[in-house]
Amino acid sequence: ATMPVISAEKDDVDVIADFLKEATTYRPSILVVCGSGLGSLSKCLENTITIHYNDIPRFPKSTVVGHAGELVFGEIGGVQVVCMRGRFHTYEGHDIRKTTLPIRVMSLLGVKFLIVTNAAGALNETYNVGDVMIMADHLNMPGLAGKHPLVGPNDDRFGERFTPLSDAYDVKLQNLAWRMAKQHNMTDKVRRNGVYCFVSGPTYETPTECRLLRLVGGDSVGMSTVPEVIVARHCGMKTIGLSLITNKVVMPGTQRTAIPASHQEVLDAALATQTQLENYVKDLMVAIGTG
Ligand code: CYT
């Protein structure tokens, strides 16, 4: 009974990849997934070709404000890059495998590196709004309970049945991101060795949930990124993850004075850091693509 579902998914990936190969001659080595309010990361690309998700057959539709819903192909410093402006979340109602379908599509186009970004809340009390956290590890809360993008028959074309995640976040790329932070005089706001906690949303976390995540070593929390990283690792891409800290979470006992998280606050924080982050990620793209 599972057969039609699997073949349909495999079919979608091929149809979309074939469509994109016809639509552009770009064969990017880097995919940048732009988080909430971070769509402007595509602005540093030159000679761009923009393709709206709505114009791509069988591509999922993006429904969140602050996510444009388009692919931007372009180049920078001789490196070909594709940016996803707008990603898919399970809280929109998409099947978890649908949220990661673009990763496999890009793998068929030849992408070797994933730069994944997100807007996240700070669990780590030393983090400030506007900080950029270099991901070193993640906690996949839905995944531990079986909501995981690789559940189902394995598609051997992409990778093996059992994928290790102890090396999910490439150490060399993390070190590169840190050197880049030094070059950009951003060491006061770039945080190394961060642990990102993936929760399903769409509600923000309760204070007790935040305490749970903090107690096991979480530094930031958000509703994306981890499914994409898992599928990217399954098909052998090297991955770097960056969390833009957009708010501080509310811990138990502090609800009286703290401000509840809001989507507007998340978008405002992203806007405030935009230009600096654009320049930082631009140099990161060039260094990764030429390195
Ligand atoms: N903030 C955010 N939780 C938060 O507190 N951006 C995502 C999830």
Image: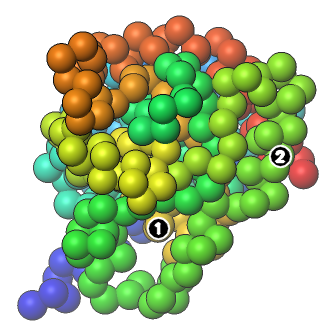
Q: Amino acid at mark 1?
A: Val
Left or right of residue 179: residue 72: left
Specify whether residue 193 is in view: yes
Q: Is residue 29 above or below residue 123?
A: below
Residue 283 location (% of width, % of height): 80, 31
Q: Is residue 190 above or below residue 242?
A: above
Q: Residue at x 17, y 82 (%)?
A: 4
Name the residue carrying label 2: 176
46 or 246, nearer to the observer: 246
State the SS at label 1: helix
Quadrant of residue 121 within the rendered picture: top left
Q: Is residue 175 above or below residue 86?
A: below
Residue 249 badge: none
Circle 1 or circle 2, nearest the eye: 2
Quadrant of residue 252 within the rendered picture: top left
Q: Amino acid at mark 2?
A: Leu
